[in-house]
Image: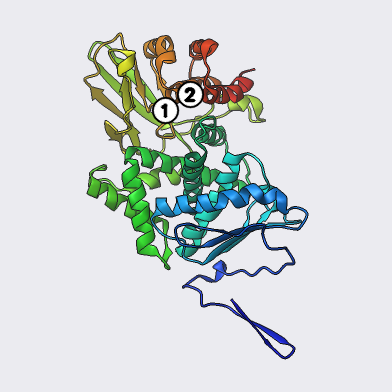
Amino acid sequence: TNVTTEGVWVREHFSRTPPMSVNSLALFISDFPQPISNNYLQTDGIRVAVWGRTDFVTALSKAQQLLPTVMVSLEIYLSRPYPLPQLNLVALPGFTDDNPVNAWGLQLFKESDLMNGNTFWLSHRLAKAAAMQWLNHLTTPTSNSCVTLGLANYLATIVAKQLEQQNIYHWHLTGLHSLYLEYGKPKSSYMNPNQKEALCSSKVQIFLSMLDQVLTSHTFKTGIQNFLSKKEFKMYEDKELWSALSDQAHQDETLAKTVTVSEIAQSWLDRDRLPLLTVTRNYDKDTIIVLQEPFINHLESRWTPAKVVKKPSPPEQFWWLPLVVLKEPDSEESLGNISTTPTTWLRPDLHELTLEQFSDDLKYIVVNPGSIGPFLVNYDEENWHLLSNKVSTLPDSVRTQLLHDALTLALSGQLPTTTALNMTVFLRREQSAVVWKTFYPLADRLR
């Protein structure tokens, strides 16, 4: 801006903005002092600053330090430079809303959101806010959608994990556990709009994580970059995001041309349930039968006034489920990195499917290893037994998944408690914080 004085008048002349929607505009006038330091992005000289009241500004030092790195990480991932000359985040006294005021180049937070604290969570909060600059202003959704918020959450998680390299927070299973608690209820309960939005964005975030893994990170990231390139300074609908991902997946041959991401997304985001996959092995014929159905917590009625809970009829359509199968290797050393490429997809018009050539009845199999997709997996008794004997040899993510699935199924009345408890024996020697963080809330429900 340029400031000129003409007699008693002081005029401030603002530069012309890029094309923008009306809801991207906001003005903030205050007597806050200039930030202690004005940081500039090394890549393009953009100024990023965190503002606050005089007696609180020192509590914002960590946010001011992290923000430039967060911005550069997002610019690299999205392959799009931040289009404005500056970004200002304000810690606003007396502001109590959990959702910040989100405008282009300016965002207002409650003070506790930006104050010094856990570096991972502060990085995540800054990255989520910064991601909305690209997803809500550089390009703008035609309507309020939890897809935009879910994508911002997912990008924030990627950036925070890159910067902090933390492994103790397994956001995927933590979010999945919350979703199963809510979507598994026999009867839906009242939720206010903010609760619905948070639940929907969590589901979108976990769904995007599934796409990132089964389509490969390269395909997913390139698809997001292509989407932003096409829709820069334009409005968009959710289907255009799915279309960009489909086009890239077809080009990279990570998804059959007869299938689209839009079809997959519709089956996941339009339903208020999550799937349960039951895997039954035929040890004589070396085959496995997989069957999908909605997950319902049949024991929930014990804690609700309802005396009788009728089992709902099967839905007209189910889900697109990526079937990734991990077979027990010949030696523990050969386990290596787990492939996330699906053997096949279980389509919505198929209730069950038979997979062949799963030989050796003395070795376990794990379907959906590490919870690649947001669905629980139940097995026949023999495979649970084989897994309980070897679970300690599996990677952290798979141990966490098996523990989560077994206890959640037992708590919903769909797996014998003794079988589930057998899957906890390995905890005697467990040292992974991720596994314990998954176990504690489930154990609390078991009491």
Distance from the alpha carbon under mark 1 to that under mark 2: 7 Å
29 vs 268, nearest the viewer: 29
- Count numbered badges in the picture: 2
Where residue 51 sits: x, y (%)?
67, 59
Q: Does residue 213 sit above or below 26 in this rendering?
A: above
Residue occupying the point 62% across, 49% down: 63
Quadrant housing the N terminus? bottom right
Classify 10 Å Cα crowding around label 2: few (below 14), some (14-19), many (20 and above). many
Residue occupying the point 52% across, 22% down: 435
Left or right: 161 in relation to 190: left
Dot placed on the residue nearer the N-terminal end, 1 or 2? 1
Q: Which mark is residue 400?
A: 2
Left or right: 254 in relation to 424: left
Secondary structure of the residue carrying numbered label 2: helix
377 vs 400, nearest the viewer: 400
Where residue 424 sits: x, y (%)?
52, 14
Determine which residue is flagged by label 1. Answer: 370
Classify 10 Å Cα crowding around label 1: few (below 14), some (14-19), many (20 and above). many
Which residue is at the far right? 55
Task: Please identify the quarter of the rendering in which residue 389 is found.
Answer: top left
Q: Does residue 414 sit above or below 101 in this rendering?
A: above
> Disc 2 residue type?
Thr
Left or right: 206 in relation to 443: left
Residue occupying the point 54% across, 28% down: 297
Which residue is at the far bottom? 7
Quadrant housing the C terminus? top right
Where residue 412 sits: x, y (%)?
53, 23
Secondary structure of the residue carrying numbered label 1: loop
- The reply to whether callout 1 and callout 2 are in contact (CB within 8 Å) is yes
Where residue 422 sits: x, y (%)?
49, 10
> Disc 1 residue type?
Gly
Q: Which mark is residue 418?
A: none
